[in-house]
Image: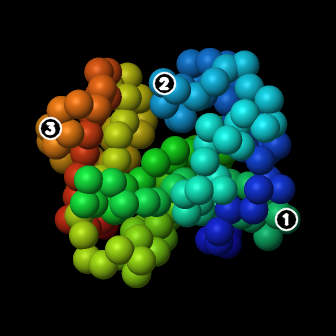
Amino acid sequence: MNFRRFDPALLPELMAWFPDAITLRTWGGPAFRHPFTPESFREDAKVDEIDSWSLVGDDGALAAFGQCYLRVGRCHFGRVAVAPGARGGGLGTRLLREMAREGHAKFGDRELSLFVYRDNEAAHRLYRRLGFVEVEYPDRDTPTEGMRYMIATGLADG
């Protein structure tokens, strides 16, 4: 499995991971348009604006995707996903660890942060296992209904 910058040529594969509005918005947030076109998906995912990362198999297949950027002073992870057929095999942990290294290299030694929907229990378990804890989001003007905001100082073994 190779960690590298996301290649937009893999967008069709990434789009296939989200067959309906619920899975899409759980991953991409409430503003993500559905139904989507290749153009709207690329625009809403902001792959040309935000550092986007991937795990890609030796066969070139996309296995995981995530983004890392600065948000309210923290190295923030967004739009994290593992290919449906590869979930539960540790790829989420690997992706987050690699993105944390990249984020620390780019933004310095900062806390890590992310949002997760309250009903996304599998992701929530992963984040807790890695040392993330739920805190109040510092920007009260940003709507966060139905979401948890979580931070970590580093990633725990897990």
Q: Quarter of the image containing the N terminus?
A: bottom right
Circle 1 — which element? Answer: loop
Circle 2 — which element? Answer: loop
Q: Amino acid at mark 1?
A: Asp
Q: Is 23 located above or below residue 17 in the figure?
A: above
Q: Is residue 28 left or right of residue 33?
A: left
Q: Give the quadrant of residue 155.
A: bottom left
Categorize mark 1 by other alpha carbons within 10 Å: few (<14), some (14-19), many (20+).
Answer: few
Categorize mark 3 by other alpha carbons within 10 Å: few (<14), some (14-19), many (20+).
Answer: few
Residue 152 visible in this rendered orientation of the protein: yes
CA gap between label 3 and label 2 equals 19 Å
Residue 90 visible in this rendered orientation of the protein: no
The mark nearer the N terminus, 1 or 2, is 2
Q: Amino acid at mark 2?
A: Pro
Which residue is under mark 3? 136
User: Which residue corresponds to the image point at 43% horizontal and 60% vertical from the top-left?
Assistant: 69
Which residue is under mark 1? 59
The mark nearer the N terminus, 3 or 2, is 2
Farthest front residue in view: 141
Q: Position of residue 31 (x, y in %)?
A: 52, 26
Labels 3 and 1 touching (C-beta < 8 A): no
Q: Is residue 74 left or right of residue 70?
A: left
Q: Closer to the camera, 138 or 57? A: 138
Q: Position of residue 65 (x, y in %)?
A: 60, 53
Q: Amino acid at mark 3?
A: Glu
Categorize mark 2 by other alpha carbons within 10 Å: few (<14), some (14-19), many (20+).
Answer: few
Which residue is under mark 2? 30
Circle 3 — which element? Answer: loop
Q: Give the quadrant of residue 121.
A: top left
Q: Closer to the camera, 21 or 70? A: 70
Q: Is residue 35 left or right of residue 130?
A: right
